[in-house]
Image (spheres, grey):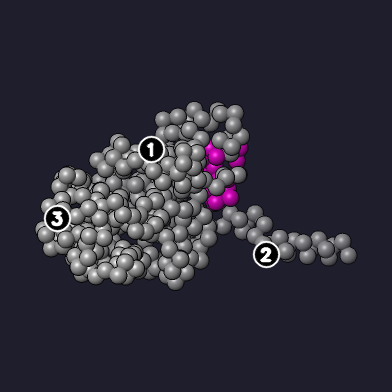
Amino acid sequence: MRRALLLFGMAVAACLGFGGTDAAHAGETLDAVRARGFVNCGVSDGVIGFSLTDAKGNWAGLEVDVCRAVAAAVFGRADKVKFLPFNALQRFTALQSGEIDILARITTFTLKRDTSLGLSFAPPTFYTGQGVMVTAKLGVKSLNDLGGATFCIATGTTTELNLADYFRSHKMEYKPVVIQSIPERDDAFFAGRCDALTDDGSGLAATRTSHHATDAEYVILPEIISKEPLAEAYRKGDPQWGDIITWTVYALFQAEESGITQANVEAMKKSPNPEIQRMLGVDPGLGAALGLSEDWVVNIVKAVGNYGEIYERNVGMGSALKLPRGLNAQWTNGGLIYAIPLR
């Protein structure tokens, strides 16, 4: 009887994934990424602060750094990543087809995207909301003054639906000028093809900065008409790969909260704080749970810094955009950045 119960318990443990061999086995995406030797990362088609190349072809931006963090977690090196730019219409197909392993392109996490596209989302890495920008010459002070106006809009984005909802609820008319790529949309607006440009507030600031325009020339109106939690996406059906992306994001958040920086991460291994010891692999276990090395968080922070460092150099006060933290501050400072416990 005892032997039968023991065998039954072993079978249940195996089915639930408690056996060591099952826990250590890599998922399909991680196997493919390791065999290839790099992560394929989908990014924006040119948005300052989020993903943009310089004259030498070097990528920079918040979403670029998140992908580098994932590469550092998997390979121990942030350069083991290939960046592939997509417009809004191309991005989901690229991920669904397996052309990319992670979609870091500024993408709003919504119910329908999460349930109908075969994708899942990691925790949002940037919170913003949709706004509207106009030329100061138009003399407009409010979105409610734009009845009958033409709007430059990027097709395949949440901005189309949000703007339609706003004007319908306010019983106003407008004329959409729908354009596929963000650079073409922006060029159309600055060329005078539209009265107004609508995008996430951060996107409007990026557009104004990249076109060397001032806030005296181009005004972002005060209304925020939506919630836009921007998050990385991955294919459903591979929970281990999803866990790696998700916990990479949480590690960036927690590193900032714990005061772990690119400069002090090695020294912080000597911290007496047990949470930091677990996080940095001094007390092992977290890396094995993800199928990664125990120093995966150390590698991430060494490569790109913590979330606050990423934010500041790409979109914060150390960048051309100079966006305040606002909702993207740590929860301890009134923001929405909150890491689930790494334990």
> Dot 2: few (<14), some (14–19), or many (≥20) neighbours within 10 Å?
few
Question: Does the magenta portion include 291?
Answer: yes
Circle 2 SS class: helix
From this viewpoint, is residue 76 visible? no
Local secondary structure at mark 1: helix
Q: Is residue 20 magenta?
A: no
| Depth check, front residue: 210 or 79 | 210
Mark 3 or mark 2, earlier in chain: 2
For the C terminus, the image quarter is top right
Q: Dominant secondary structure of the magenta stretch?
A: loop
Residue at which label 2 appears: 15
> In the rendering, at what x and y percent does residue 300 appear?
44, 42
Q: How much space separates mark 2 and mark 1, taking CA atoms? A: 42 Å
Which of disc 1 and disc 2 is earlier in sequence? 2
| Magenta segment boundaries in residue numbering | 279-295
Q: Residue at x 51, y 35 (%)?
A: 258
Q: Name the residue under label 3.
A: 138
Tell me the mark number nearer the camera, choosing from 3 and 2.
Answer: 3
Question: Is the C-beta separation of discs 2 and 1 under 8 Å?
Answer: no
107 relative position to 134: left or right: right
- Sequence-first tag of 3 and 1: 3
Any part of residue 197 in sight: yes
Mark 3 → mark 2, Cα distance in angstroms = 66 Å
Q: Which residue is disc 1 drawn over?
A: 309
